[in-house]
Amino acid sequence: MKAFTRETSTVAYVPGVNCDTDQIIPGRFLKADRAEGYDKFLFHDIRRDPDGKLDPTFPLNRPGAGCSTILLVEDNFGCGSSREGAVYALADAGVRALLAPSFGDIFFNNALKNGIVPVRLPVATCEALADHLAADPSATVTVDLEADQVVLPGGLGSHPITIDAFARDCLLQGLDEIEMTFTYMDRILTFETDRMARNPWLAR
Amino acid sequence: MTHASDTAPRTLFGKIWDAHEILRHPSGQSLLYIDRDLIHEGSFHAFADLKRRGLRPRRPRQIFGIADHYVPTLGRSADDAASPAIARMIRTFDENMEWGGLRHFGIASREQGIVHVVAPEQGITLPGLTIVCSDSHTSTQGALGAIAFGIGQSENAHVLATQTLWQMRPRTMRVTVTGQLGRGVTAKDVMLALIARIGAAGAGGHAIEYAGEVVRDMSIEARLTLCNLSIEAAARLGMVAPDETTFRYVAGRHYAPTDQEWDLAMAQWRALPTDDGATFDREVEMDGAAIAPMVTWGTSPEDAVPITGRIPDPASFASPEKRKAAAKSLEYMDLAPGTALDGLPIDRVFIGSCTNSRIEDLRAAAAILKDRKAAVPAIVVPGSTQVREQAEAEGLARIFREAGFEWRQSGCSMCAAMNGDVVGPGERCASTSNRNFVGRQGPGSRTHLVSPAMAAAAAITGRLTDVRRL
Ligand code: SF4
């Protein structure tokens, strides 16, 4: 996994509460091989008009928006389908951090496993940040995982990043979770032997 | 968050979680033992990951593959798929299953169906287990008293490689539904009413236990519908304590224990229900008698109202975000505030999906359709091949056909439109599925979520209709 320590960027604001993963990547694109790159599917249908032309009013279609590696989004972002393709699309488009009042649980975990930091901020802070960005699109935000804080522009101060220490460590070190778990294999095997002895039908 | 000691009263959730916690990392995450991992065609990324690492599934006997998302419903071979790319997904799935030495129910298998319908049906889902699948509606399977939740592909690769998963312990929420449901009101309506009340983000970070008289009285199939929709309230999972109804359902299923092992299992299962005095982080109570048949009007499952209701005015919502979202939804749905839902014309009907495609769902729909004709195009997609066969044996298939419904082979079909079964742009569909998201049933599709009986009623009149009137 790509390590994450600190990221400073302008911020693209993609509004919409309950933005589900079907909006982030429509189901029909999930057949694609990852090697192809998933960035071209990001927000595919909602950033285009029905004829397939890019809608110039969609935030990420505006000039310069594509350079932002931090997105401001709304409540319950990434709800719905567990498709990790939603995170692949964001990651392949260069997104490193997301700011929102809340995220879908599965999406949240998927993001962490792909080197993207989802930062939960109070609703009022998100609203104030959106207002500030409208007035000053060149304002930047710093997501500093080492210092465990996100630094906002426009007098909005800094806020703690509320991801658990385990996920934080993995991100900071770009740690491979499977390899890390293998170091606990003796404890897994002891547990498993006991569980199978009491539930032998589980592994038939 | 509290971790109960050995003697303190515990919840159903707490007991199963504790029994699967191999260790707790100092940071707070638990390494959980996973009893069952279920695979579908979309899991191919996890297999690519394993192959890249030179790993293979560590516990093949605890992994089951079931083809559902991409399978055609008009034939039973990959050659029947809607496009070569979809056919490739089905073939890749078979190849991966063989490569991993995994038991799998491919497209032509008699055990095939939607993973969350098949797993309980086959006894793969059992009380007290931890079950994962790279699909958010894995929550369905908690209906048998299991911890069952959806994961992503990275997590799936982790489970395949280690049979474990790192997880933060969710908070707990109990939803108690008291009294009795009225005529024509189903588990689907209970959930749409709950989601409308607490919101599509309302149970975020929580494991829900459903309780109360209404839930006690429900069949397993109704409980599966209940737990299925937990994810639409953003819950991590949903569950119902195992009881006699559960044990009767599980007994004799293919992968369920038998003989002395059954007794061994029962001793464990009987100890699972939440102890008196155990506390939940959150409690929600609903009066079952006050719930009406529900229908959604917008593009989130929280946009649900009783069929007797009207489309709300976006201005009536409290927050500016909700006002904006409601206005956008209505624009997409081509609906005006104040319109009565009852009588709204629709273009087609879909009965299917892991929410409502089991035999009781088909019986409920067929009871309404008997000796009547559908006024709009309609399809029924049974949740599994076994459900299909049973419905044929019971004469339900004939009722559907005579009513003008297409009687399809089982799969996810029009729920997610990945196999090519789509609702056309601008078409309005009364659907028994679980998501009315923008474009979910095909680009430009407009979905109204309803129960199977309500879908049947809508088919007959060509309009959203209060089934209690028919
Ligand atoms: S029926 Fe729909 S919701 Fe259920 S597993 Fe299939 S695609 Fe997902």
Image: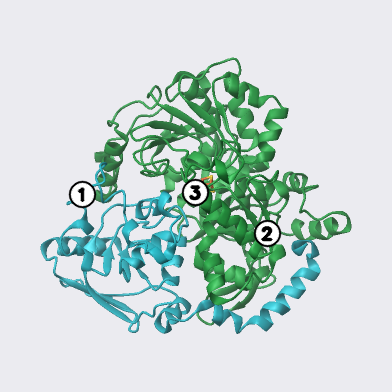
Picture coordinates of residue A173 (x, y %)? 42, 84
Closest to the camera, between mark 3 and mark 1, is 3
Q: Nearer the viewer, residue B294 or B221?
A: B221
What amino acid is labelled 2 in the image? Asp
| Quarter residue B364 falls in | top right
- At x 43% / y 50%, what residue is drawn? A27
Badge 2 element: loop
Which lettered chain is shown in cyan?
A: A
Q: What residue sits right under mark 2 in the picture?
A: B275
Picture coordinates of residue A25 (x, y %)? 37, 54
- At x 47% / y 81%, what residue is drawn? A175
Q: CA distance from mark 3 to mark 1?
A: 29 Å
Picture coordinates of residue B383 (x, y %)? 61, 40
Colour of chain B in the image: green
Residue at the extreme left: A135
Picture coordinates of residue A165 (x, y %)? 45, 79
